[in-house]
Image (cartoon, grey):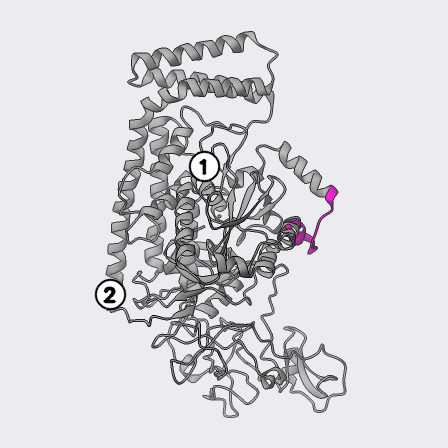
Amino acid sequence: MASDQGMVRGDHGTVLTPTSSSNQVQPLSPTVTKPVQELPDELIQAGWSKCWSKRENRPYYFNRFTNQSLWEMPVLGQHDVISDPLGLNAAPASSETGQVTTEAVVDNGQHKRRLSEEAIPDAPNSFKRPKVDVQVNPTTPTIPISPSTTGTPLSKTWNATTEDKQLPTSPAPAPYRPTVIYWDLDIQTNAVIKERPPVDALPPHPEVELMRSQLTTKLRTNYKELCQQREGIDPPRDSFNRWLLERKVLDKGKDPLLPSECDTAVSSSMFREIMNDIPIRLSRIKYREEARKLLFGYAEAAKKLIESRNASPDSRKVVKWNVEDTFGWLRKDHSATKEDYMDRLEHLRKQCGPHVTAVAKNSVEGICSKIYHLSCDYARRIRERHLALLKECNITENIETPEVQDRLVYCYPVRLSIPSPSQPRVELHFENDVACLRFKGEMVKVSRSYFSKLELLYRYSCVDDPRFEKFLSRVWCLLKRYQALFGIGVHEGTGLQGALPVPVFEALHKQFGVTFECFASPLNCYFKQFCSAFQDTDGFFGSRGPFLSFSPVSGSFEANPPFSEELMDAMVTHFEDLLQRSNEPLSFIVFVPEWRDPPTPALTRMESSRFKRHQLTIPAFEHEYRSGSQHICKREEMYYKAVHGTAVIFLQNSAGFAKWQPTPERIQELMAAYRVSGRTLSSQGTTSTSAGNAEKENEAGKEQGTSKDVSTRDSSSRDNRNLTTASLETTSV
């Protein structure tokens, strides 16, 4: 896999453009041949043998342990930056005198360790990779261009010459090869933006991230205690996570996670979700007896609440009369069906709901206000600690931002204007297929395949750490940040990172030229260009920053936002503003839940938008999402059924419609991709399931109202006015 971050020597005005990744010719599979010369015993013991290539009519060397193939005789102790980036298996190449050689590269293109690398003391997070000199293609077009600033390497050219394709390959990919891949990092972007300066966010540091995680966990605990003490309920599922999303839409503060500067202290999202669970939480029911117990529990809780609060005489009278009427009906009618109980519950809620809301309003607003002010205090303490740490490293916050040219460039990852301080030691070890990173006793985990993915994204996107010396600490900060966002509960917050199935992404790219995700993360992204919530931690791994701050001029985009009403509404406003301003081809394919009772403002606005070109609906239980915990979950848990319908809306300007028109043939291909079961792909590697199995899964999903499919993506963010429909979910602001 070619890297898109190389080093170009010479004029910074040189123009580069991404087209398609180039692959050098791979040697053929090894065949038995008569050796031309004997190999040293050390190489034979290391697994090397000499073979003959029938295609090239020349000998080559093959390692049966690592599957590496080289044209020239391998160097014992070679440090392969692709298969062993951490250098765990590398040894310094020695000369005949036994001293470490200072030669950086031999004729066959193999890289040895440099003397300067051996002399670096205590580089605990070091990943080694060489600098690449890129030959500039003089025929490259000039607009748009890849961004370049002083001291920032330009993108590597993706056009391979004929001579390049005839050369033998570099050392083969890493010996660890994931059996199933959920991304395609070879796809180049077609998203064009105006060149932008580096952002002034503080660079991540494990000490600060550990403090932020601890305070966020403490804030969650305070929220839970306030709900239990004041309202006698547990906090609604994922309501804290949606509070973070809703607040960050409005927040002008400096902390990347905790809100600290909002116009109002009371969150409409948190207030609405707590109110939905007062006086009791209305869960999804399956049987008649469950419906009867739910009706009885609601009536009893409403009566208790109205009697214990300072309610008006009229409110007490209305609630008491309706509750007693419900109790009388329950005692008399023993032949009622589940639907009868649910209808009666809906009637009781309409009669008592306004009075219950009135008496609980001040208390719930107090909870929202208390949590917000605690968040402000925690954000202030975190920033003070962060600035003190930078000061210890002689780094100041006031860094002059370099000027950028007013020109169009292909989108590129976020850059930080403040240099990164030295990083502490982060330990890495592997437990089977899980990578474990530890800092001060705090361990974060990621599957080995996703760890390799992060390494590739880092190689493509990071420009200030060519030798991977800060890689482990930045991965630890990234994982700790998303762990703090998700929460510590079982399956908590993972719905905020749900992603589309791989076949759908493939169809979007092939049929509609999609190369960019508007809401993703380094952990769940399919393309290597995406927007995410946290520009400070994610920028090193390819993030273009928060989408609401990202202003593309042209390109084809996929948008699967977190299912937060406030965020989705802000997203639609941003879409329409971008489509209005641009005359270049611009297209957004939006995936949102089809909530109709009542419809969300975002869905209503998109359906009536003048930029809407097409709309389709994927029925509930007939499509899947990839789990938000895909970077650590088991393979059989990677996909789950969606318990709600998904609306797919095409928003395009005139040029975008002309270039990526949603024709019936393209729509048919997209719908066919949805019929491919991701569970089958994960477990068997096949591309489809039988219609009979699909029907059985659908029926089973509809029968299981409280299954994991529901609990993973279910939420309380919507008003529970339709008790048979759950409200749900992917990331980032």
Instruction: Report whether 512 appears left or right of 382.
Output: right
User: Which residue: 26% across, 55% down?
Assistant: 383
Q: Is residue 238 above or below residue 28?
A: above
Q: Is residue 486 above or below residue 137?
A: above
The percent coordinates of residue 74 (x first, y second) are 60, 84
Q: In this figure, which residue is indicated by the disc labeled 1? A: 237
* Quarter assignment of residue 568: top left
Mark 2: secondary structure: helix
Residue type of the residue flagged with mark 2: Glu
Instruction: Report whether 507 appears left or right of 233.
Output: right
Q: Bounds of the magenta span?
A: 676-692
Q: In this figure, which residue is indicated by the disc labeled 2? A: 392
Mark 1: secondary structure: loop
User: Which residue: 26% across, 64% down?
Assistant: 390
Instruction: Report whether 483 appears left or right of 161.
Output: left
Q: Residues within 10 Å of mark 2 (few under 14, many from 20)?
A: few
User: Which residue: 38% across, 38% down?
Assistant: 269
Residue type of the residue flagged with mark 1: Arg
Judging depth in this view, the residue of 252 and 131 nearest the camera is 252
Query: Where is the N terminus found, in terms of image quarters?
Result: bottom right
